[in-house]
Amino acid sequence: MKKISLLLLSLVLLASCGGKEPTIDELISTGDVKVISQKKTELLNEKKELESEITAIEKYLDENSIKKDGTLVTIKTLNDTIYNHYIELQGSVNTKQNITLMPEMSGILTHVYVKEGQRVTKGQVLARIDDGGMSQSIEQMKVQAQLAKTTFQRQERLWNQKIGSEIQYLQAKAGYESQQSAIKSMQQQLSKTLVTAPFSGVIDDVITERGNTVSLGATQILRIVNLDDMYIEVEVPENYITSVRKGTQVDVEFPVLGEIVKSIVRQTSYFINPANRSFKIEIPVDNIKGNIKPNLTARLKINDYSSAAAILIPLAVISENQNGDQYVMVASDLQEGGLYKTAITKRIVITTGKTSENMIEITSGLEEGDNVIVEGARSVKEGQQIRIKKV
């Protein structure tokens, strides 16, 4: 019964309006929630359509029209800042103590005393080569040397007593010294059967196993590496010769490890390569963790220039006149007005310095507090009125 009453009331309202759509107040007075909700949905849809149309119109006007208040632009207010310029290069890690040990004599490798990954000290015996009976020969020579020594001592006593001939004394002396020299030479040869560590480090690879025949200066036996003294050597273009010197700061990044370490240039070359007009520099690497290996790729950022109060602007805002002078447009005489600030454009000739990514240093022409036009810089002329967009 209630629904029928509401329906009749709606018909009465429509009739009283002469067929016109009822007002919001009239709809609310009916108390029909369904009808009211439907009206709300219709109004919200109309609102969205209107907002979308207004936004499109405003965008067009901002981008394509010049209103009486001037072209719409954005500005950047300049502040001095600390500026560090870097040269970016790529190199790989080296170590001066990374060598492959080869035998000093040929023979059969009878012993290998170390394993891969084992730490060794300088002078430690790492492997042994068969001496081919040399040690027995030395023992025999020592017996002969003892006899030669006894003969010499007797001849020396006789000679001191003026007994015997000088020639016998000299022959005994020569025989004894010859035996001593021969033993010393044989012992030096015998020492070559031992493969020893030239420096302290780690056995990286056992290349030749026990029982194999090795050849003098040809067969690789072991590789020993010391990871304490790591460095990177790279070539730098010659135009940086005055700015990249001993002590220059360097950031060393290892992409594979995800690490960045601080270092300095330890040494610079005194020679410029005529083939590519570059010079070499050496950068030490601190390897406390021991995870930096020889031939690991490294990216270097070498700090070749620093300024404590630099003025930087985007590269894109710089233009060039017919004389080759670089200039930027700045906003002067800023005035508050309505939705936007207004200003007058002014052309400033500049000189530039170092470039870093999309920014460039200004060495003259601009100073702290200047308002450089960024968006719209190429669409305005000197002396033109502009509107400044809020950012």
Image (spheres, rainbow, N blue to C red):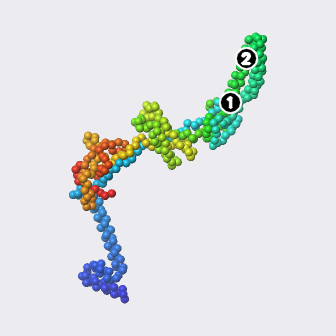
Determine whether the residue tagged by mark 1 lies in a helix, strand or loop: helix
Q: Does residue 181 sit above or below 56 in this rendering? A: above
Quarter assignment of residue 15 = bottom left
The three-letter amino acid code for the residue at tag 2 is: Lys
Quadrant of the snapshot with the C terminus:
bottom left
From the top left corner, tell me how far across and down residue 50 is, in percent. 30, 67
Q: Does residue 287 sit above or below 273 in this rendering? A: below
Circle number at residue 191: 1
Disc with the residue nearer the chain's start (2 vs 1): 2
From the top left corner, tell me how far across and down residue 126 is, in percent. 66, 37
What residue is disc 2 on?
Answer: 173
Of 51 and 67, nearer the camera is 67
Local packing at callout 1 (Cα closer than 10 Å; few below 14, some 14-19, many 20+) is some
Local packing at callout 2 (Cα closer than 10 Å; few below 14, some 14-19, many 20+) is some
Quarter assignment of residue 142 = top right
Determine whether the residue tagged by mark 2 lies in a helix, strand or loop: helix
Of 214 and 127, nearer the camera is 127
Question: Nearer the observer, disc 2 or disc 1?
Answer: 2
Quadrant of the snapshot with the N terminus:
bottom left
From the top left corner, tell me how far across and down residue 118 is, in percent. 64, 42
From the top left corner, tell me how far across and down residue 287 is, in percent. 55, 44
Q: Does residue 313 sit above or below 168 in this rendering? A: below
> What residue do we see at 28% from left, 50% from top?
330
> What residue do we see at 23% from left, 57% from top?
69
The three-letter amino acid code for the residue at tag 1 is: Ser
